[in-house]
Image (tube, grey):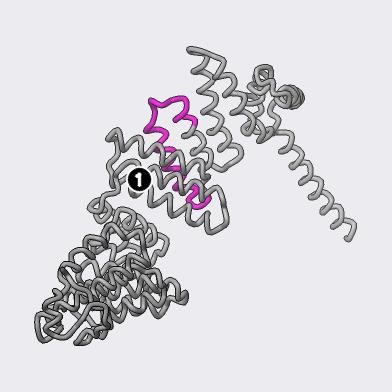
Amino acid sequence: MKAKVLFILMAIFLTGSIANAQDEEAKFGDNPDKCRAQLSTYDQFYNQDNFKDAYAAWSWCFKFCPQSTKNLYIQGPNILEYMIKNAEGDEKEAYIDTLLLIYDQRSEYFGEEGKNKGRKAIEIMQYRSGKAMQAFRLFQEAIELDTIMAEVNTIGRYMQLSTILYKNKVIEGGELIEIYAQLVDILGTQIDAGQAAAEKAKEQIDGMIINTGVLDCEKMVEIFTPMFEASPNNEKLLKIIQGMMEREKCFSAELYAKVSEKLYENDKTASTAHILAQYFFKNNQSEKAESYYKEAIELQVDESKKADLYFEMGLLYFNQMDQYSTAKTYAQKAIVADANYGKAYKLIAQIYAKIAKDCGENDFEKRAVNWAIVDKLLQARSASPEMAEELNPMIAKYSARFPKKDDAFFYGITEGQKYEINCWIGETTTVRFNE
């Protein structure tokens, strides 16, 4: 009984081995010996970079034993490109036909249909430019099949062709933006996986879409709104939308705010809070802006980066909320964070100018505020010399408003003495006159 079982197992093993051997032999076609010989011939010529003499043997194998080796399809394009380059007329067209057939046949025998569709589309762009729409459809199919596994060369050339079709009014701007968003999403995944080539491809397609001029705010709102509503938690999509809208300064768009707030919900950082604070500031929603500025300040762990936040918050209190004392407090915080923050000194000067008419019991005291205003403007110029062009006219303007010497004499005040400004300003300055 045991012998019988052993015999059956051996028979099964032998049958399987024979079947595998038959399958292995079948890939060399109806004439295996000639196939092997032709493979050897073309391989020798190919390794010598003699593509001309390699072609005949390669062509025979491509036709009669197409599944013998994947090298037929890896090396074939190089051979065909040489033949195309050195041919003319109908002969050249025949070589191009064969080159395009390579990718169909490679998919049939060795799979990777998506990659081969992309490669074929690239060859059509190169050799059959009149069939741009055929290449475009192949690119679409390639991306649909491979998604995040798509080759970066396919992604780049797909975007390139899409921009050409847009410029020639074959596709609309909305479709171009959708293609761009799809490709950036794929590249983002590849970049996260550490693919350096994807980073370069991202830079290239960014440049392509910028050069088309298609990225206007109205069009982006039209295209991205339904995409956002369909996938409000797709962080990669949200970042794409936010980045594109920021690049075109679409800060007043409601979609920009919605996307930014969603990103903030998912990842509360100082930078996302700052973005939202700026949005609501620019759109005169002061209370929401104030709330996000406070969160940005709390979340920002780098003290040196808080100067901008303090300064902008000071501007908010000054420009929109009429809280001048609080505005000054935040301008001073900006100076503490960065002693060379000239804009903060300028803001304090503007605050003093705003309340000058209400600071003092008489005209002399009101004019004395101009000493403090000019002091802050001079400090601003010293801290940030690059601001001199905008500060010098202001210094001249407020210097012209200094009290006159005769008026000062009436109050017993002399040039050069120290003088304390009344009201909440609380500045001690030096007496100067406008002669």
Q: Quadrant of the C terminus?
A: bottom left
- Can you name the residue that lies furthest to the right here? 3
To which quarter of the image does residue 344 belong?
A: bottom left
Question: Which residue: 44% across, 43% down?
Answer: 141
Question: Which residue: 39% across, 61% down?
Answer: 239
Compared with 289, 197 (above or below) is above
Tell me the magenta residue range. 123-149
Q: Quadrant of the N terminus?
A: bottom right
Write down the residue under mark 1: 210
| Magenta segment includes 260 | no
Q: Amino acid at mark 1?
A: Ile
Local secondary structure at mark 1: helix
Prevailing secondary structure class for the magenta stretch in the rendered image: helix
**Crowd around label 1: few <14 · some 14–19 · many ≥20 (10 Å):** few
- Residue 297 visible, this angle: yes
In the visual, does 59 lie left or right of 166? Answer: right
- Residue 31 visible, this angle: no
Question: Which residue: 19% across, 68% down?
Answer: 398
In the visual, does 20 lie left or right of 273? Answer: right
Compared with 205, 390 (above or below) is below
Compared with 234, 4 (above or below) is above
Q: Viewer-proximal residue, 220 or 75?
A: 220
Q: Viewer-proximal residue, 91 or 303?
A: 303
Residue 48: x %, y % from top left: 73, 23
Q: How many marks?
A: 1
Residue 418: x %, y % from top left: 27, 83
Residue 425: x %, y % from top left: 23, 83
Question: Which residue: 20% across, 72% down?
Answer: 319
Q: Viewer-proximal residue, 58 or 286?
A: 286
